Every structure is written in C-alpha cells, then in structure tokens.
C-alpha cells in the first residue's frame, strides 16, 4: 500500500518507537493520528508532524472507539494501524523475601501489551473491512510491536515475555482471519532500542547493552524501527510474519 495520502493510526505515538513511526509515516505523506494515554506529549508530536493527537487508553474500549471515530472524522477512515503502545515490567516470580510475585502485576502487563493491542486491532479491523478495496484487493495493514523477549526473555520477564509472545502467536491467525478482508498483519520484534527509557540508564549500562549486540554493536535507532514499520505497509506480500529487528542479539538469561 502506498503510504502517501493514507490515514494512519499510531498507538503509543507520543514517545519512543511510536513517535519515530508517527514521524516517518508523516514524512512519507500519511495523515497521522497519534493515539496515546499521554495526551500532552501526543499533542507535541502531532503538532510537529502536522498530525492530530487523541487521548486513548488501549485497554479501554470506549476510549479506543472514541479515538478511532475522532481520527476518522479528522483524517478519513484509517487503513494503517501501528500498534506500538506498551509497558515493561521486571519481577521475579519468587521475591527476595520468599513471597510470590503479585498476580496483579502479571495481569496488568498482559492487559496493556496483549489485550490492549488486540482491542485496538479488532476495532480497527471492523472499520477497515467496510472500506472499499484498493488495487489488488487490499484494504488495510496493521503491525504489532512484540520484543525479542517473546523468544529469549530474561530473568524476571515472565509477564513481559508472555505478553509479547502472545502478540507473536496472534500474528498468523489474525492474518489468516483478515485475509478475506484484504487486511495484512505483521509483527516486529525489536531488540534494544535507544528510546527515552533506555537513554535514562547510566552510560556504562547503555554501553554494556550495546556491546551485547553482535552487529552493529550499538542500540537500535527508533528511526530504524520506523523504517521497517513503513516497509511493512508498502510491501504488499509481507503478511502473517514476525520480523526480529535486533542486530543478531540473543538475550542472555540475565
Ligand atoms: N525500546 C526498546 O528497546 C524496545 C524493545 C522491544 C520492544 N519494545 C516495545 O516497543 C513499544 C514502544 O516502546 P518504547 O521504548 O518506545 O516505550 P515508550 O515508553 O517510550 O513509549 C510507549 C508509549 O506507549 C504509551 N502507552 C502505554 N500504555 C498505554 C495505554 N494503555 N494506552 C495508550 N498508550 C499507552 C505511553 O504513554 C508511551 O507514550 C512497547 O510496546 C515496547 O514493549 C521496545
């Protein structure tokens, strides 16, 4: 699908990988709706790229429905959905004091990363399936943001890895399901990227993370993630696939 002129949605577009994706889509001529629970920051990004910001909590159906409707009103019906919103977590299953990890922590990460992504995707897909098909029968395309932790999660990453592994598992069945509507689904599993969270870590920690990446031995650039996200849109034969973007990194147990 050609990006120019399309209406696109980016969840988590206020920061990090989502922000870079929103910027790249806009650079390539899309009308971009920045969907984030951090409206203030989303507005700054949107103002910078000539897009529009919408407050949206991906776990809250009413909030997502309102944001999709408002974005369609502002930019026309969206054919591109970039699911980038997500949260991290690190918790050992048995704590230092011998107590079991709180179930709420596990549930919260699954709720945002997996169920939230599914929530936006199902509501987007229902809208997109009603649109007129483009050349070749295509109606839309969506991307999930997993993580290499879906495959080689580290100590303490049970919840995060399970949530991202859920996105990996959901990719093919959703692509198969939506094939009849001409909607493609792909997932990117990033390694370690230089987003605000990582850039706050002390320099030596950043350097040691970078050194763990075979080549190039540096943190990924958010713009590299954004380029791949946009390539998924333009390459009509990419579907049902999970792409690692990690400089050949395989994470160690800790
Ligand atoms: N940065 C990395 O190295 C890395 C590596 C692998 C995977 N990822 C994944 O990439 C995605 C983006 O990561 P990032 O580093 O850019 O993080 P970030 O914290 O910079 O950005 C995440 C954005 O998502 C938004 N968000 C969180 N929960 C939300 C919700 N319920 N509803 C709406 N918006 C919500 C936040 O407000 C924030 O703007 C996440 O899914 C993360 O798990 C990041």
Image (spheres, grey):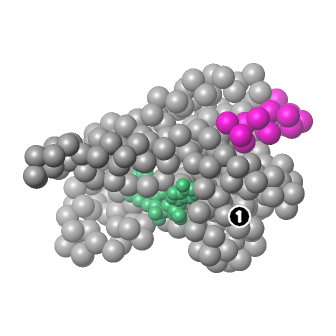
Quick check: 209 left or right of 3?
Answer: left
The residue at the point 75 percent across, 22 percent down is 180
- Badge 1 is on which residue? 54
Q: Quadrant of residue 48?
A: bottom right
Q: Is residue 127 magenta?
A: yes
Q: Is residue 223 magenta?
A: no
Nearest the viewer among 228 and 175 is 175
The residue at the point 68 percent across, 54 percent down is 63
Nearest the viewer among 30 and 146 is 146
The residue at the point 19 percent across, 73 percent down is 204
Answer whether residue 88 is visible to the viewer in this image: yes
In the rendered image, the residue lying farthest to the left is: 97
Quick check: 37 left or right of 64?
Answer: left
Q: Position of residue 86 (x, y in %)?
A: 48, 53
Quick check: 33 left or right of 103?
Answer: right
User: For the magenta stretch, what is the residue range?
Assistant: 122-138
Q: Is mark 1 within 8 Å of ligand 1?
A: no
């Amino acid at each position: 699908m050609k990006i120019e002129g399309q209406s696109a949605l980016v969840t988590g577009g206020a920061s990090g990988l989502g922000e870079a994706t929103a910027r790249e889509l806009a650079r390539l001529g899309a009308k971009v709706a920045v969907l984030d629970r951090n409206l203030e920051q989303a507005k700054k990004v949107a103002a910078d790229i000539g897009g529009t910001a919408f407050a949206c909590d991906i776990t809250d159906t009413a909030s997502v429905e309102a944001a999709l409707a408002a974005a369609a009103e502002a930019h026309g019906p969206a054919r591109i959905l970039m699911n980038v919103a997500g949260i991290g977590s690190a918790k050992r299953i048995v704590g230092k004091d011998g107590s079991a990890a709180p179930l709420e922590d596990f549930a919260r990460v699954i709720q945002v990363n997996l169920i939230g992504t599914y929530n936006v995707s199902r509501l987007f897909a229902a809208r997109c399936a009603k649109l007129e098909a483009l050349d070749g029968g295509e109606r839309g395309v969506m991307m999930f943001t997993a993580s290499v932790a879906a495959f080689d999660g580290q100590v303490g990453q049970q919840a995060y890895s399970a949530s991202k592994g859920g996105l990996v598992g959901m990719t093919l069945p959703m692509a198969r399901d939506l094939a009849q509507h001409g909607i493609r689904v792909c997932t990117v599993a990033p390694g370690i990227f230089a987003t605000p969270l990582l850039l706050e870590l002390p320099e030596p920690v950043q350097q040691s993370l970078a050194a763990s990446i075979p080549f190039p031995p540096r943190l990924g650039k958010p713009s590299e993630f954004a380029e791949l996200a946009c390539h998924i849109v333009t390459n009509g034969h990419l579907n049902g696939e999970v792409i690692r973007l990690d400089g050949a990194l395989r994470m160690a147990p800790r």
